[in-house]
Image (cartoon, helix red, strand yellow):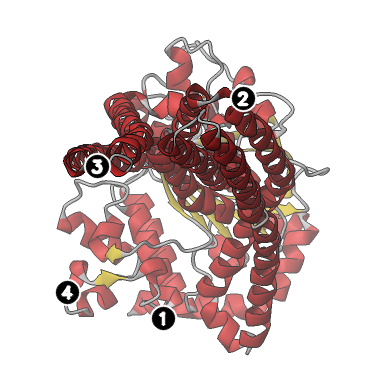
Amino acid sequence: MIGLLKRFGRPFRRELTLGPASKLIEVIFDLLTPLVVALMIDRGVGERNVGVLLAYGALLVGMALAGFASTLICQKMAARASQGLGTSMRDALFAHINSFSYVELDRFGTPSLITRITNDINQVQLAIALAIRQLTRFPLLAVGSMVAALLIDAKLGLIFLISTPLIGAIFWFVMARCIPYFKRMQRQLDQIGLVTREGLSGARVMRAFVREDYERERFCHTAVDQANTAIAVGRLSNVLNPATFLVMNLAVCAILWVGGIQVNVGALTQGQVMAFVNYMTQTLLAIVYVANLVVVFTKASASAGRIEEVLACEPSMCDAAERAGGDDTGSGCTAGAVGEAAPACETAPIGTASPTGTTSDVLSGGFDPSVPAIRLSGVSFAYPGSAEDAVHDVTFEVPRGGTLGVIGGTGSGKSTLVSLFPRLYDVARGSVEVFGRDVRAWPLGELRRAFGFVPQKVELVSGTIRSNLLWRDPLASDADLWRALKTAQAEDFARALPKGLDAPVEAGGKNFSGGQRQRLTIARALVGAPPLLIMDDSTSALDFKTDAALRRAIRMLSGADSSVTTVVVSQRVSSVRGADLICVMRHGRAVGVGTHEELMATCEVYREIAESQLYSDAAASAAEEGGAHA
């Protein structure tokens, strides 16, 4: 947690300084209070002097008010520092997570990252607030009380020296056994987050299969595991207070016994004995509170470690702009941190002039038209921890303005292959070039802005249709949005909505059908006229007529603007048969590359797929012809 304070605490130095300083003032008054009470007893009660009693009573009231004022200042400083640090950590963590490649996201997992950015940061916030408010107070109070007691009487001070190590031994015994439980609790919270997320996001599927009872039992089992761990920690933690109070009360009894003897012989006054008891009580109560703080700080330490683990994880992908800036620290190139064989950026042709000119030249078309839009040369890729390649030795090129179709069975590597084009993953071997430039030589932001990407899993966020469509181009006009909706075959149902572009979209687009969500996602990718369009199995929820109309609109778009290169991933032959180039994937390998006619003659895998879909293709052709006549 010290590392997090060093990293994020600089803007809050004033709060981190004034808070403990204010608490120190309160501690000073607390330490003086037993002495004032002793004087009240000896000079006021003992001598029956009401004036002295009133004077010392007024002094106690003044000290209490001053202590209360310093406490308010400390509370405000603690709140500002803890909330400010928590906000800074949460912002930094969220920004850092968004810089991760898919490799790091796969490594940590979404539920774990959500837990770290919420629960773990909350634990650290709580620890910071308590550190300012109480960690300053109670250790100083314990040490100050011990020193003051020893100054009153060294013999009675021996009781402190005996009782304090006993309490310390109790702390060590309990905490040494609690720390593993706290770490286990955080992992179990990750699991609860995973089960909750799956159960809520898949509620419709769960109900369709009548799996409510199963999911309820699954959640209950996960929650009970976490509860059992929390109960085990609670049992251990509950040993602290009774044990420390037992030691404290025994010590107070010893003080009263020995102190009574000292009063009888005239070595001490009654007020001094009472002051000694008060100091003893303050010391041991402070130690008890410190024990409770140790529990909080132990949990916060485990949470801080999880936060620092994410912040210390460098993205495995290097941005060309960062490398061009002379970053010698290795930032953004620490592939070894996630188990990759070698940093991908080391193999990229950095520092050489692009054969296609500047990025603006590439996107505006001001370069050699003979350069292919996409070229793969011996590309292989394996997921971290996998013994086999998900994509193995794939080579082909797609001309500018052309259409690439990628087809294959489930798990054949289609989606993995096209995710290499915008560099969502880095290749392990070979190279991927976009407009003649290796993707590792592109600035990541510019490379991905060159693509309109329609993912296999539809992702819409809460807001409106307009706010979702403006993702690629925030400055797009309404005319641009309606044009994209028309191309995506979504204009009719969007115009039928009462608010049109301002119609609300629920989280995940749950207020739209599956086909409507897919068409909105396609429209989002078309806004801004990207030079490259990837459609990863994005028409699976569309009927044949709508699918045919969409493919026809995409072809017309490419015909009107030859700079648009389209990549279509599908399991339907009808979706890819008109492509300029078709890549047939099987077990991560390209078993056939060519046109529809060439593959029907030379590729057995493609021929089997086409023959198995013969009826579907006939229906699709009929739908397309019907749409053309209409």
- Give the Cα distance between marks 4 and 2: 48 Å
Mark 4 / mark 2, whichever is N-terminal:
2
> In this figure, which residue is indicated by the disc labeled 3?
64
Question: For residue 334, which numbered disc appears in the image?
Answer: 2
Select label 2 or label 3 by which is in front.
3
Q: Does residue 138 appear to the left or right of 612 in the view shown?
A: left
The mark closer to the camera, 1 or 4, is 4
Residue marked by disc 4: 499
> Which amino acid type corresponds to the residue marked 4 in the rendered image?
Lys
Quadrant in which residue 77 is drawn: top left
Distance from Cα at disc 1 to Cα at disc 2? 55 Å
At x 36%, y 61%, the residue is 461
User: Is residue 310 in sight in this rendering?
Assistant: no
Q: Amino acid at mark 2?
A: Thr
**Label 4 vs 3, first from the N-terminus:** 3
Q: Looking at the picture, which amino acid does disc 3 mark? A: Ala
